[in-house]
């Protein structure tokens, strides 16, 4: 029964996004548009930069220019100590939103920039569970990249409810500028254990009826992910399942200049220079 309509636009198109925000005048924006698949962004760093980093900047700037009350930036555990270009571009996006939130502090009609970081959502596009289900339906094998590969998981419902709660906390929090809300993902799950369990639940015997094949880590992959950086001591919040990470503050003007250069390199297709600058922006 909610009054709603869909609009198609590209977060990389400044003019389109600014015009859209001016016309729609949103109060609350959830920014989840990103290239999320690690090996894809490893192969196309320029595209990852333009969508994940530059696209986030364009959306965030449009929010500030059009008096949006709160932007909720959906981030990822892969932005912590990133080994992949996807994680690094998402970390740049986090940093920019953190910097804007601090810059906006004290303004009468300020926009709040809230970043929410979490790991894998079960059943989402690219999730390992639907992949295993398809492989099981075909009689196997189930493909696991490494015997010790671990990942955090949560359900769609958990992710949505915790994001909404973090949005409320971030919108009204006084003095929490630039902080990141981290969803408590529980203990990481061994992908090998998940594969074996799914085979058993389907009524088969692992390795006898259905093989598990080790394919090797893909480009940019880590064996395990983290939701907090060592320099982000967590604080508990009034909501169970949501932690608050202290910010690693970056200067907005300095970051803006770096993003200008990064956008120029990426749009010109200068891949080596783009990757080198990402390394400087995300040590």
Image (spheres, rainbow, N blue to C red):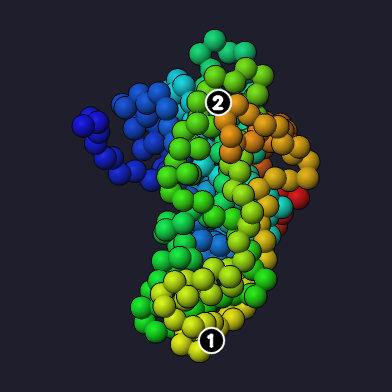
Query: Which x, y percent locates residue 167?
Result: 50, 30
Q: Position of residue 237 (x, y in %)?
A: 63, 29
Disc 1 is placed on an element classified as: loop
In the picture, which quadrant includes the N terminus? Answer: top left
**Which residue is drawn at the image coordinates 57% and 30% (left, top)?**
239
From the top left corner, tell me how far across and down residue 230 is, in percent: 78, 45
| Residue 37: x %, y % from top left | 51, 61
Between 126 and 7, the one lying in front of the other is 126
State yes or no: discs 1 and 2 in contact (Cβ < 8 Å): no
Determine whether 142 is above or below 44 in the image.
Answer: below
For label 2, the residue is: 169
Residue found at the far bottom of this picture: 208
- Label 1 CA crowd tier, 10 Å (few <14, some 14–19, many 20+): some
Residue 238 at least partly seen: yes
Label 2, secondary structure: give it.
Answer: helix
Residue to which mark 1 is pinned: 207
């Amino acid at each position: 029964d909610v009054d709603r309509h869909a609009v198609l636009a590209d977060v990389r198109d400044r003019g389109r996004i600014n015009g859209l925000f001016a016309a729609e005048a949103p109060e609350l924006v959830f920014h989840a548009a990103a290239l999320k698949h690690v090996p894809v962004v490893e192969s196309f760093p320029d595209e990852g930069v333009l969508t994940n980093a530059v696209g986030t900047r364009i959306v965030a700037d449009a929010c500030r220019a059009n008096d949006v009350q709160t932007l909720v930036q959906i981030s990822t555990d892969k932005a912590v100590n990133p080994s992949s270009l996807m994680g690094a571009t998402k970390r740049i996006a986090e940093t920019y939103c953190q910097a804007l939130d601090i810059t906006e502090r004290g303004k009468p009609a300020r926009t709040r920039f809230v970043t929410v970081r979490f790991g894998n959502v079960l059943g989402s596009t690219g999730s390992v569970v639907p992949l295993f289900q398809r492989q099981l339906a075909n009689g196997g094998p189930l493909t696991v990249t490494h015997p010790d590969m671990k990942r955090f998981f949560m359900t769609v419902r958990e992710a949505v409810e915790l994001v909404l709660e973090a949005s409320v906390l971030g919108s009204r929090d006084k003095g929490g500028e630039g902080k990141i809300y981290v969803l408590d993902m529980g203990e990481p799950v061994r992908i090998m254990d998940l594969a074996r369990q799914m085979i058993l639940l389907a009524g088969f015997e692992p390795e006898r009826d259905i093989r598990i094949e080790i394919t090797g880590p893909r480009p940019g992959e880590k064996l395990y992910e983290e939701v907090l950086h060592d320099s982000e001591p967590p604080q508990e919040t009034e909501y169970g399942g949501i932690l608050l990470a202290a910010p690693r503050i970056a200067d907005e003007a300095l970051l803006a200049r770096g993003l200008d250069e990064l956008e120029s390199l990426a749009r010109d297709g200068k891949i080596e220079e783009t990757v080198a600058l990402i390394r400087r922006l995300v040590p």
